[in-house]
Amino acid sequence: MSEIPTDKITPPEVYFNRRELLRAGILAGSMAGTAALYRLLKARPMAPPETRKLAVAAPARDAANSGFAVDEPLTSFESITSYNNFYEFTTSKMDVARVAANFKTDGWKLEVGGLVKNPQTLSIDELRAISPPEERVYRMRCVEAWSMVIPWAGFSLSKLLEQVEPLPEAKYVAFETLLDPTRMPGQKTSVLEWPYVEGLRLDEARHPLTILATGLYGRELPPQDGAPVRLVVPWKYGFKGIKSIVKITLVADQPVTSWNRYGAEEYGFYANVNPEVDHPRWSQATEQRIGETGRRKTLPFNGYAEQVSHLYDGMDLRVNF
Ligand code: MTE
């Protein structure tokens, strides 16, 4: 897709200096740089959206060992909800919350089917009834080289998969976001092909770290973070975390995924966080944690190697990036 401007998936220190901060009138042409952005994000006086509080189960006792919690400062609620990638609304990260503010999710249905014994269509209440939301504090590493630590409320996707009973032929899981340009104005543009689609291998989808999140910071997800339900796969780049899901389909073959279709040489199907495999246009060795100054080293599998590296035994992760 040639119509996408080159700034769409550029590291924020480049992107913001050049465009967003200028547009916001903050730096007015100066080169003060990234630090100003992160101070701005921390200080931004934005009222938290009025989403409902959730009854979230306390973290599991073995949270650290299982990877269900990380011992790093949480990114502020304000940053998590005001710096977003959600192209169905806008490609401008700091505008997503405003553009998505009136997105209504009443009557949402999630269809789960394909190669399964028990296909189901679930309301969000029925989905939450499968397993009460648990707190999962995960690192989130965007392919653009910024990161956050987010306290999600969700449950292992494996529990939903158990309920629908995948057939032996099912090898992958395909996910689809709502397609409704009247409610998602970004879908009137061709910045990506719509609907946004993602996929996992079945064993990745069944891994206990892989969750369907319906909340964060103990509240229902706000629209900009993927209300009412999104995927979170903490050892993969953030673009695998498809938002506002309406359909989950068990399939035999590797499904098409949005960013891979957009640029296969830049965005692999696996998209495991890997500091040794650079993006063709920037390094993946370090990252900017939102709210911090200075950069951190990016960890293999985003710090979840102990839990997930066995899934890729025998695979060349430079080829299957
Ligand atoms: N899902 C949909 N449907 N549309 C999107 O544009 N962006 C992805 C992912 N899921 C995206 C999406 C990208 S690139 C990232 S980094 C994360 O959502 C960002 O999640 P956040 O805004 O909650 O931090």
Image: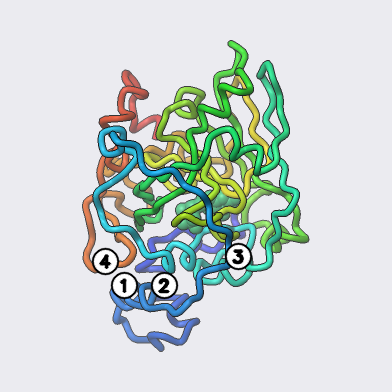
Q: Which residue, given by chain and number where applicable, does mark 3 sit on?
A: 90
Along the line of sight, the residue nearer the viewer: 182 or 27: 182
Depth check, mark 3 against mark 2: the one in front is 3
Mark 2 lies within 8 Å of ligand 1 (Cβ measured): no
Is there a contact, CB below 8 Å, between mark 2 and mark 1? yes
Q: Amino acid at mark 1?
A: Thr
Residue drawn at the location 31% of the way across and 38% of the way down: 63
Q: Give the mark nearest the N terminus, 1 or 4.
A: 1
Q: Position of residue 211 (x, y in %)?
A: 48, 38
Gap in angstroms between the C-alphas marked 3 and 1: 22 Å
Q: Is residue 21 above or below residue 178?
A: below
The image quadrant that residue 87 belongs to is bottom right
Q: Is residue 139 left or right of residue 107?
A: left
Q: Which residue, given by chain and number where applicable, does mark 2 sit on?
A: 16
Q: Amino acid at mark 2?
A: Phe
Is there a contact, CB below 8 Å, between mark 4 and mark 3? no
Name the disc covering residue 292, or none.
4
Residue drawn at the location 32% of the way across and 18% of the way down: 314
Q: Which residue, given by chain and number where applicable, does mark 1 sit on?
A: 34
Depth check, mark 1 against mark 4: the one in front is 4
Gap in angstroms between the C-alphas marked 3 and 2: 15 Å
Q: Amino acid at mark 4?
A: Glu
Q: Secondary structure at mark 4?
A: loop
Q: Give the mark nearest the N terminus, 4 or 3.
A: 3
Q: Position of residue 226 (x, y in %)?
A: 57, 53
Q: Secondary structure at mark 3?
A: loop
Gap in angstroms between the C-alphas marked 1 and 4: 10 Å
Depth check, mark 4 against mark 3: the one in front is 4
Q: Secondary structure at mark 2?
A: helix
